[in-house]
Image (cartoon, rainbow, N blue to C red):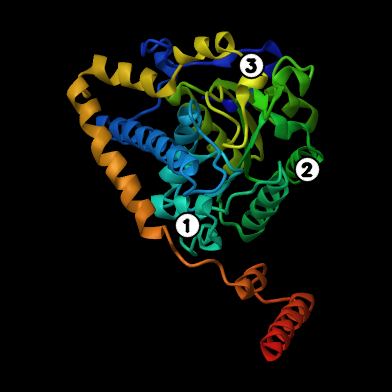
């Protein structure tokens, strides 16, 4: 696939597999073994299980605010699987499937949403940045990482994720402009789930699609069906290899947020069942299930047999971090930079002096 041959101005959306699990563009079908396909399906199911368990725990008061990924698993798992181990991933806060396929352990994911700073500790081997809640600010980080990789001659690509609402932020435009000028090995991935909290995509931009924004910066842009995991994988693989040699690419994955923005949100206030129901037929998990069943590598029994082990895996992971001690205040100062700045050291000294004074008053 020649990524720079697609014209987003034509508003073409790349598909490989239709909603019934039929391959409609076999020439774009990515090369995958049956074992790989089952691995992708298992990861999508695991992401959906984490969603279900986390939402239940949050409603019980055992987790903090949680951001659901329901309906977006294809965009996340497909794009993440296109990366090499040495490629960097810079997420926002709704990339659960990518985190799993990239290697972030379930217990660490849950630890983050549990409220522990240690949930953001990735280690040196995993080239994955922690969750970024500020919208699109991490795009500039991604451009910087990619420039560093280029200057070092490492041939590593950095992919960064945002939602459709993120394209309205200045950081988004600044990062794309910088990346295009310096031809950094970046893939900028928009999960267009149709809503920025309660604001629909139509209120974000008057453009036909979001992929066409790439043209103004001088980079390829491509629009893909985000609920078609094969199309996402094929497009992202091509984008990653293009970026590795030539410079940045912008991908818009057309998907839908089936659940609430977060557990603090009530989507019934801004959309109706008639808005949501048509997307149930486009479910990325069911679409891949249908394909695998027709191919004879997955059965109804296999599908049902996954449910209990996955739920147990997720709950066991949660129990391993539940009641974990709170983050020590000192750690907040220690892990902002590789070496603590003089300003942070002054603040830490002031905090420790306050503690000593408080203890002496007791």
Residue 82 visible in rendering: no
Q: Nearer the viewer, mark 2 or mark 3?
A: 3
Quarter residue 339 falls in: bottom right
Residue 275 visible in rendering: yes
Side of 111 where 175 appears, left or right:
right
For the residue pair 15 and 2, the one nearer the viewer reads as 15
Q: Is residue 90 above or below residue 360?
A: above
Residue at horizontal 61 percent and vertical 24 percent from the top: 267
For the residue pair 131 and 116, the one nearer the viewer reads as 116
Side of 73 where 192 appears, left or right:
right
Of labels 2 and 1, earlier in sequence is 1
Residue that numbered label 1 is attached to: 126
Label 2: which secondary element: helix
Residue at mark 2 to residue at mark 3: CA–CA distance: 28 Å
Residue that numbered label 2 is attached to: 171
Residue at horizontal 39 percent and vertical 33 percent from the top: 44
- Mark 2 in CB contact with mark 1 (< 8 angstroms): no
Q: Nearer the viewer, mark 3 or mark 1?
A: 3
In the rendered structure, find residue 271 and report the number of the disc placed on it. Answer: 3
Residue 213: percent from left, percent from top: 75, 26
Residue 177: percent from left, percent from top: 79, 39
Quarter residue 257 falls in: top right
Of labels 2 and 3, earlier in sequence is 2
In the picture, which quadrant includes the C terminus? bottom right
Residue closest to the far bottom: 360
Residue at mark 3 to residue at mark 1: CA–CA distance: 38 Å
Q: Residues within 10 Å of mark 1 (few under 14, many from 20)?
A: some
For the residue pair 175 and 308, the one nearer the viewer reads as 308
């Amino acid at each position: 696939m020649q990524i720079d041959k697609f014209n987003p101005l034509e508003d073409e959306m790349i598909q490989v597999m239709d909603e019934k699990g039929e391959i409609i563009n076999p020439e774009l079908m990515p090369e995958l073994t049956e074992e790989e396909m089952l691995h992708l399906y298992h990861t999508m199911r695991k992401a959906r299980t984490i969603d279900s368990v986390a939402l239940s725990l949050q409603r019980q008061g055992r987790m903090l605010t949680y951001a659901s990924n329901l309906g977006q698993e294809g965009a996340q798992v497909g794009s993440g699987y296109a990366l090499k181990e040495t490629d960097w991933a810079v997420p926002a806060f709704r990339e659960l499937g990518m985190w799993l396929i990239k290697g972030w352990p379930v217990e660490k994911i849950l630890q983050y949403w549990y409220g522990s700073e240690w949930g953001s500790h990735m280690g040196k081997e995993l080239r994955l940045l922690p969750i970024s809640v500020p919208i699109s600010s991490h795009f500039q980080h991604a451009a910087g990482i990619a420039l560093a990789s280029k200057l070092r001659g490492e041939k590593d690509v950095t992919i960064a994720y945002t939602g459709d609402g993120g394209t309205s932020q200045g950081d988004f435009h600044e990062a794309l402009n910088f990346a295009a000028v310096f031809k950094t090995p970046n893939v900028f991935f928009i999960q267009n789930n149709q809503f920025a909290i309660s604001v629909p995509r139509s209120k974000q931009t008057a453009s036909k699609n979001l992929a066409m924004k790439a043209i103004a910066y001088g980079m390829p842009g491509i629009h893909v069906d985000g609920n078609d995991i094969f199309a996402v994988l094929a497009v992202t693989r091509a984008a990653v290899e293009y970026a590795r040699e030539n410079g940045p690419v912008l991908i818009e994955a057309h998907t839908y947020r089936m659940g609430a923005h977060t557990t603090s949100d009530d989507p019934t206030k801004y959309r109706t069942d008639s808005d949501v129901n048509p997307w149930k037929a486009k479910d990325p998990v069911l679409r891949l299930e249908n394909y695998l069943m027709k191919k004879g590598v997955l059965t109804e029994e296999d599908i049902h047999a996954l449910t209990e082990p996955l739920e147990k895996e997720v709950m066991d992971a949660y129990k391993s971090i539940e009641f974990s001690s709170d983050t020590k205040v000192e750690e907040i100062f220690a892990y902002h930079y590789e070496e603590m700045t003089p300003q942070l050291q002054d603040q830490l000294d002031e905090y420790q002096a306050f503690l000593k004074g408080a203890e002496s008053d007791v």
